């Protein structure tokens, strides 16, 4: 039953939108919301039925037909829907509410929410709202923006979607449309996985939602491309380690501090299956390379046995594919593990990323940590202090404070 | 043992204000509360929720619509519980999930339990 209401909200909105089109998305959302409230009223007294999804879909179907028959709706909706006759709608309604159609409806909605006409931030917000059933306040908390901003973003995004058809894109454009979808799901996942702000629960929800949606894509004959499978594997490997990254007090545990027995072996095994499936293509995406790195970590029975040489190769390939400063920073960390802290520092000093990452606290944090490992505490301390001043995350500040404390104690010895 | 009716009042909410996740939490809390009441023998009738809208009839048998969604507070449901004393009934009410709603109040009233006419 966990998150049933939220997920059923997303499923029902996606299904009913196929009948009423995206132009009437607000009507569909009103219907679904009323439906969930009715379920709440009934179930709190009578208990949850054996098949809650079937119950709710049946009631939704009847409500929609009743609304159309008796025109029980706002004037605006009545005007928009005046041409829809209940008898004509009924077969479509019955069709989209079939259990076998639910995933297809969600898939169509994923492509709509991740429509290339929309800005990336709008795609993310719309996906969370429409497919994951997040409320404005939850999206605001998840993305660390105000509720007003989210409402604005969503209404802007919907305006742009009014003429978009709910369909899985044709083969000619599928690859480019799929790339946008993967990017959005990657962002949603990372928002939950990489952020050290905000509540743990909502970040975990973001990761779970991204995994739930990508699995729908991965199981589809045309959307389950090698890149889709690689991203699925990447998310699963990360998700397997999610619980071990913080201790009970919410403090960050680094890779060498994590209890590897807490890594979820089922998720790792599932990730491996998707790695296998991802290798059936000719092109290697960045998701392949990132998944490969995450896989290397999962494979190592201990931190000491990590295959840093292989990881370094994968970062080299990533940088060739996409010269991102964040990849370069992580490559330097891998290099430091393989050839020592001095090699890592040298890579960071030589590389053009130093200026690109100037405002990024993790550059200072990394330099500080590498100097600390070299025993250069006098150099490490100012780097760590700068890093601390640049991050607003309490968890990261706590971690940096621990490192600073180590340095100062060593320095005074 | 005396019976008490808990009358649930709150601001009439519009559906859009409640997040699906919150609905689910409320529902689970109700199921747990009602289940506990039956398991411990103090739940007489979990009652029912009242749908919004309704009709009001006056002494002249004139029918009007209401209460409306604009009302400050409406009755949204009721339950009947057993308790030794008012304090006991208040304790039951304090554990009731109706109070998860911000604007909620519970009116606690003892049933007179008048004998039916012979």
Image: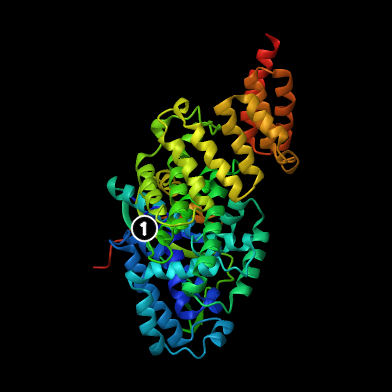
Q: Chain of mark 1?
A: B
Residue A342 position (above or below residue A330): above
Residue A51 place in picture, x, y as percent? 30, 63
Can you identify the residue that label 1 sits on?
Answer: B112
Note whether residue B54 is visible.
no
Measuring 60% from the left and 33% from the top, which residue is drawn there? A333
Q: Residue furthest left?
A: B118
Q: Nearer the viewer, residue A224 or A365?
A: A224
Measuring 40% from the left and 44% from the top, which residue is drawn there? B88
Q: Nearer the viewer, residue A6 or A107?
A: A107
* Image quadrant where one finds the N terminus of chain A: bottom left
* Image quadrant where one finds the C terminus of chain A: top right
Q: Nearer the viewer, residue A204 or B60?
A: A204
Measuring 55% from the left and 28% from the top, which residue is drawn there? A338
Residue B49 place in picture, x, y as percent? 41, 64
Q: Is residue A215 left or right of residue A134?
A: left
Q: Residue A375 lies in what quarter of the image?
A: top right
Residue A139 place in picture, x, y as percent? 58, 56
Colouring method of the image: rainbow
Residue B76 position (above or below residue A19): above
Q: Label 1 neighbourhood size at 10 Å, few (<14), some (14-19), many (20+)?
A: few
Q: Is residue A193 left or right of residue A377?
A: left
Secondary structure at badge 1 equals loop
Q: Nearer the viewer, residue A221 or A107?
A: A221
Q: Is residue A406 left or right of residue A213?
A: right
Note whether residue A156 is visible.
yes
Residue A64 place in picture, x, y as percent? 43, 79
């Amino acid at each position: 039953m966990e998150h049933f209401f939220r997920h059923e909200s997303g499923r029902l909105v996606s299904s009913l939108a196929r009948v009423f089109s995206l132009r009437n998305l607000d009507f569909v959302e009103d219907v679904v919301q009323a439906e969930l409230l009715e379920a709440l009223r009934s179930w709190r007294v009578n208990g949850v039925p054996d098949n809650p999804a079937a119950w709710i879909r049946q009631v939704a179907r009847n409500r929609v037909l009743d609304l159309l028959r008796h025109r029980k709706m706002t004037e605006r909706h009545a005007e928009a829907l005046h041409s829809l006759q209940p008898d004509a709608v009924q077969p479509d309604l019955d069709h989209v509410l079939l259990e076998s159609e639910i995933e297809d409806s969600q898939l169509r909605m994923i492509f709509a929410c991740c429509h290339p006409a929309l800005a990336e931030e709008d795609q993310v917000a719309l996906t969370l709202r429409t497919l994951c059933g997040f409320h404005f306040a939850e999206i605001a908390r998840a993305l660390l923006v105000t509720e007003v901003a989210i409402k604005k973003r969503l209404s802007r995004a919907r305006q742009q979607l009014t003429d978009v058809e709910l369909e899985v894109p044709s083969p000619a454009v599928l690859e480019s449309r799929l790339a946008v979808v993967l990017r959005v799901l990657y962002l949603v996942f990372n928002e939950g996985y990489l952020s050290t702000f905000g509540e743990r629960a909502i970040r975990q929800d973001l990761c779970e939602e991204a995994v739930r949606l990508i699995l729908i894509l991965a199981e589809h004959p045309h959307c389950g491309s090698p890149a889709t499978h690689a991203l699925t594997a990447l998310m699963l490997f990360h998700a397997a380690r999610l619980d071990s990254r913080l201790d009970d007090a919410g403090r960050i545990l680094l890779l060498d501090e994590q209890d590897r027995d807490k890594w979820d072996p089922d998720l790792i095994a599932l990730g491996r299956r998707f790695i296998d499936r991802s290798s059936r293509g000719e092109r290697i995406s960045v998701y392949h390379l990132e998944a490969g790195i995450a896989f290397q970590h999962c494979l190592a029975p201990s931190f000491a046995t990590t295959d840093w040489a292989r990881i370094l190769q994968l970062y080299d390939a990533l940088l060739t594919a996409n010269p991102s400063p964040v990849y370069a920073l992580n490559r330097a960390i891998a290099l430091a593990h393989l050839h020592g802290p001095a090699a890592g520092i040298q890579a960071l000093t030589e590389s053009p990323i130093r200026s690109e990452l100037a405002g990024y606290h993790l550059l200072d944090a990394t330099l500080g940590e590498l100097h600390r490992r070299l025993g250069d505490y006098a150099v490490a301390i100012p780097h760590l202090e700068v890093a601390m001043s640049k991050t607003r995350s309490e968890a990261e500040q706590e971690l940096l404070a621990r490192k600073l404390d180590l340095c100062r104690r060593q320095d005074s010895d | 043992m005396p019976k008490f009716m808990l009358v649930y009042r709150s601001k009439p909410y519009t559906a859009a204000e409640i997040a699906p996740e919150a609905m689910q939490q409320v529902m689970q809390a109700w199921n747990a509360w009602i289940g506990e009441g039956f398991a411990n023998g103090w739940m007489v009738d979990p009652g029912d929720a009242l749908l919004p809208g309704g009709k009001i009839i006056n002494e002249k048998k004139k029918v009007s619509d209401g209460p409306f969604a604009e009302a400050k507070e409406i009755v949204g449901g009721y339950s009947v519980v057993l308790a030794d004393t008012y304090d006991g009934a208040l304790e039951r009410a304090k554990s009731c999930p109706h109070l998860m709603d911000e604007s909620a109040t519970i009116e606690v009233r003892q049933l007179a339990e008048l004998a039916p006419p012979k």
